[in-house]
Image: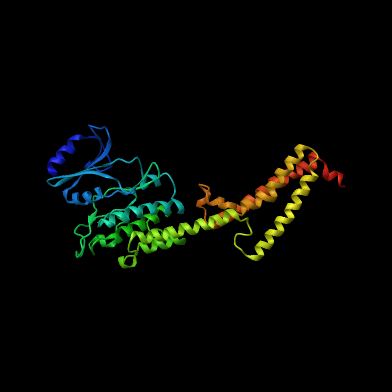
């Protein structure tokens, strides 16, 4: 039955162009000659037919949908959905690395997909940048289960030594049987690569919660890793909730009040009070003409208020700018000082122009 289905599927889905860089050309972009639908047509080993049949029954947004599976002799044919997008490997070449927020978002989607395949007793065994795709609508898709395997209770080790160098867990080299913790190891390596552009043995990311998660994922001993994808998801979701609460506080509270320290609140209150009175008095003094008043408002805004707010990272704006968000804390402090000096120079210079050149206030007060 499966052999007849194989011949039928192979005939009805017409190969268009080969996909991937493999010289064997086993994966094609194909078209249904009846409906015109574009799909991916893949020739795999017959041993993988059972794995793909299990995936066919799964509907999860981070897994490529399998439409048909058929077997003939030593070969199996898989028809799956075509997804437009870029692999993480292709995506990363266009940028230096991913931000913490991007990494956390993509890894959470990856883990959701892994959790689903692990429920089916499937171990992917090749989680790496080339096998993770970001669709055009920003959804992570797990690709290529060609070296995936079904976990077999009681087996001591894998019969085949396969995997991508740097991402393959130690047990994939014949020491013991691969299981869900094998994919967790690779997910940790992938997370490190997204944040640093390097493998952990070259440079390991150690900052904050993501650094802790990475170091737990890539433990040599599987017993010291997370036991499931859901454990990591829980920690990432807790981190997201904490950061959202922190961002909400940062957006609602002015600089000086965000930490809750008494001396900072007193200092900020004095500054805002004194500078508020000074701003109103200066604007009234320069309100000789509509133009001079508008220019004085701009000058006061620049060097009294904007210089302070930008340098103190109000609304967390430094973390949102594409280039600046890659700066570490020291870099942001230096940027804040530069902005503070620049805005004071521009604003105070404009005020001097208004007072001396436009209104001659400095001359009248002599």
Number of labelled discs? 0
Q: Quadrant of the N terminus?
A: top left
Residue 37, how many percent across, how many down? 27, 35
Q: Name the residue located 46 percent from the left edge and 57 percent from the top edge.
A: 240
Residue drawn at x 22%, y 55% as measured from the top left? 149
Residue 206 visible in image: no
In the displayed structure image, the side of residue 301 where residue 38 appears, left or right: left
Give x and y (percent) for residue 305.
68, 50
Query: Which quadrant would residue 287 be assigned to in this image?
Result: top right
Q: Residue at x 73, y 52 (%)?
A: 276
Image side of residue 85 versus residue 43, left or right? right
Asked if one can make out residue 354 in the rendered structure from this viewpoint, the answer is yes
**Residue 103 spot, x, y in % from top left:** 42, 53
Residue at 14% x, 38% y is: 7
Q: Nearer the viewer, residue 34 or 110?
A: 34
In the image: residue 281, left or right of residue 54: right
Figure coloring? rainbow
Q: Position of residue 175 (x, y in %)?
A: 24, 64
Residue toward you, 252 or 308: 252
């Amino acid at each position: 039955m499966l052999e007849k289905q194989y011949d039928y599927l192979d005939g009805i889905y017409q190969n268009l162009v080969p996909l991937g860089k493999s010289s064997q050309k086993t994966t094609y972009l194909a078209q249904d000659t009846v409906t015109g639908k574009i799909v991916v047509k893949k020739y795999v080993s017959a041993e993988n037919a059972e794995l793909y049949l299990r995936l066919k029954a799964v509907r999860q947004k981070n897994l490529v949908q399998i439409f048909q599976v058929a077997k003939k002799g030593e070969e199996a044919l898989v028809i799956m959905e075509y997804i437009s997008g870029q692999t993480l490997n292709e995506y990363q070449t266009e940028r230096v690395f991913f931000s913490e927020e991007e990494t956390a978002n993509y890894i959470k989607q990856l883990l959701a997909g892994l959790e689903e395949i692990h429920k089916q007793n499937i171990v992917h065994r090749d989680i790496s940048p080339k096998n993770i795709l970001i669709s055009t609508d920003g959804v992570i898709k797990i690709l290529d289960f060609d070296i995936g395997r079904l976990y077999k209770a009681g087996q001591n080790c894998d019969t085949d030594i396969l995997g991508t160098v740097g991402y393959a867990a130690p047990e994939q080299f014949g020491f013991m049987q691969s299981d869900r913790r094998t994919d967790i190891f690779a997910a940790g390596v992938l997370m490190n690569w997204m944040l640093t552009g390097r493998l952990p043995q070259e440079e390991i990311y150690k900052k904050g919660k993501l650094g802790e998660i990475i170091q737990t994922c890539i433990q040599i001993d599987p017993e010291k890793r997370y036991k499931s994808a859901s454990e990591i998801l829980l920690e990432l979701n807790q981190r997201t909730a904490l950061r959202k609460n922190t961002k909400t506080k940062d957006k609602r509270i002015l600089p000086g009040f965000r930490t809750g320290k008494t001396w900072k609140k007193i200092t900020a209150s004095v500054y805002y009070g004194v500078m508020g009175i000074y701003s109103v008095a200066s604007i009234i003094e320069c309100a000789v003409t509509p133009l001079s008043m508008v220019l004085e408002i701009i000058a006061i805004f620049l060097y009294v208020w904007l210089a302070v707010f930008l340098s103190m990272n109000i609304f967390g704006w430094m973390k949102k700018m594409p280039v600046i968000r890659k700066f570490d804390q020291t870099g942001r402090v230096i940027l804040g000082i530069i902005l503070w000096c620049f805005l004071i120079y521009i604003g105070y210079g404009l005020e001097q122009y208004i007072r001396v050149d436009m209104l001659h206030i400095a001359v009248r007060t002599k």
